[in-house]
Amino acid sequence: MFKEIKISTSKKNEMIDITSSVEKVVNASGSDSGICVVYVPHTTAGIVIQENADSNVQKDLLNALEAMIPKINFSHAEGNSDAHLKSVLVGKEKTLVVEKFSLKLGKWDAIYFAEFDGPRERTFYVKVVEG
Amino acid sequence: MFKEIKISTSKKNEMIDITSSVEKVVNASGSDSGICVVYVPHTTAGIVIQENADSNVQKDLLNALEAMIPKINFSHAEGNSDAHLKSVLVGKEKTLVVEKFSLKLGKWDAIYFAEFDGPRERTFYVKVVEG
Amino acid sequence: MFKEIKISTSKKNEMIDITSSVEKVVNASGSDSGICVVYVPHTTAGIVIQENADSNVQKDLLNALEAMIPKINFSHAEGNSDAHLKSVLVGKEKTLVVEKFSLKLGKWDAIYFAEFDGPRERTFYVKVVEG
C-alpha cells in the first residue's frame, strides 16, 4: 500500500503531527503485521518521531536545531543551507513497526512532519509492506 | 516476527550493546533474507550503529553529543530537552539487512541502545520482515 | 534482492552520488512495489539523501558538519572520532520507497555515499524487499 499525502505548512520552522494520517494508511492497508515507511520527498524538511504530550518539546527542538547551525559562510545561492542541514540532521525517512493492524509506537510517540523552509505546499509518502 | 525486549540502563548517558539480542530474534525468525527494524518506543533514547572495537568511540560520541547541546533556555518543564534533542540527532529506529539467516552488519558494526535520560527501565522492538 | 557495491573515495570528506547504482539494483530486482534499504557497513561514513541540483548544497553540508564537531578532547586513539560522530549524525542506513518498478524519490533527491574518513576503498549494501 502506497499513499502520497499533501500538507500545507505555515511557518519557516514548524512541526506538524501527522500520526493520524499515517495510521489511516496502515488501517486501509489491512496489514496485520509489517513495516511502514514515512518518507519526505523534499530536501529542506524531515520526519521526526517525538513526544506529543508537551508542545514545548517541539518548540525546544526547533530552537535547539536553529542554535546548532554553525556561523559559517554558506555557498548555496538559494540561502537555505540551514534548512538542508536540519533535514540531514533529523532525517527525512523513518521506518515504523506494524503489529496487530496498527502502528506500534511508544506511549508518547507522535510522527511529525518537520518543516525547515516554509511556508510551502508539501507532500509525504506512506508505504506499508506486509510481512 | 516481532519481539519487545526489556533493558535496564544505569547512567544518565550510556550506550549498551544489544547486537546479540537483535541477532537472536533474527535467528528465531528463520528468515533467510529480509530486513530487520530496531525501534525504541521512547523519546529520550535512540539506536546507534557504531564501532565496538574500542569503547572510547562510544565515550567520545556521548561526550561530543553532550558538548553539542546549545546553551539556550529550554521551555520543557521536565528539564530533559537535551535528551529529546540527542534522540532526534542519533535517531530512534534503524533498518538492517538480513542475508543468509543473519544480520548483514559491517566488520566493526554493533547495535547500541543509546540512553540519554537514565537510569530507567526501557524497551526496544525488533521486527523482522522476510523478502 | 541483495547487492554489495564497491566504491573508491578520494578525499577526507566527500559526498558521492550513488543514485544510479541503487536504481540499477531496484531495476534488476524486478520488484514493482516494495522498499529499498541502502546500508553502509562502515562506522566513519554515512548515507545522505539530499539535493543534487546545486553542488554547493553538498559543499555547505560537509563544511557545516565539520564546523559542528565540538572542540573537546577525544579519547579514541585512531584520531578519527570526528568521522564517527558525523556518521552518527547523518546516519548510515536509509529506507526508500519502491513504486512502479522504480525508486520513489523526490524531484531533487539524490542518494549520496558520505565519506568522512577517506580516501578509502568502501562498500555499501542495497537490499530490495517486495511488498
Image (tube, coloured by chain):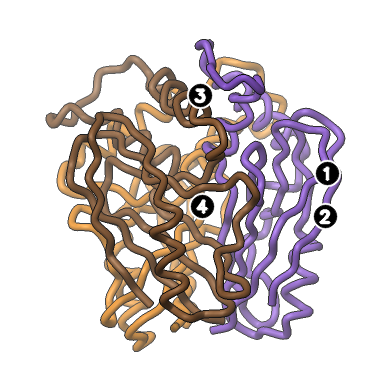
Chain colours: A purple, B orange, C brown
Q: Position of residue A70 (x, y in %)?
A: 51, 16
Helix, strand or loop at disc 4?
A: loop
Front tag of 4 and 2: 2
Q: Are marks 1 and 2 in contact (CB under 8 Å)?
A: yes
Residue B69 numbered mark, or none: 3
User: Alpha carbon of mark 4 to alpha carbon of mark 2: how far?
Assistant: 25 Å
Given the image, what chain letter belongs to the residue carrying mark 4? Answer: B
Residue C11 numbered mark, or none: none
Say which residue label 4 marks. B92
- Of the two numbered discs 1 and 2 on the same chain, state the one appearing first in sequence: 2
Same chain check for tags 4 and 1: no
Residue A121 numbered mark, or none: 1
Q: In the rendered structure, which amino acid carries the disc numbered 1?
A: Glu
The answer to whether residue B63 is above or below residue C99 is above
Helix, strand or loop at disc 2?
A: strand
The answer to whether residue B64 is above or below residue C25 is above
Q: In the rendered structure, which amino acid carries the disc numbered 4?
A: Lys
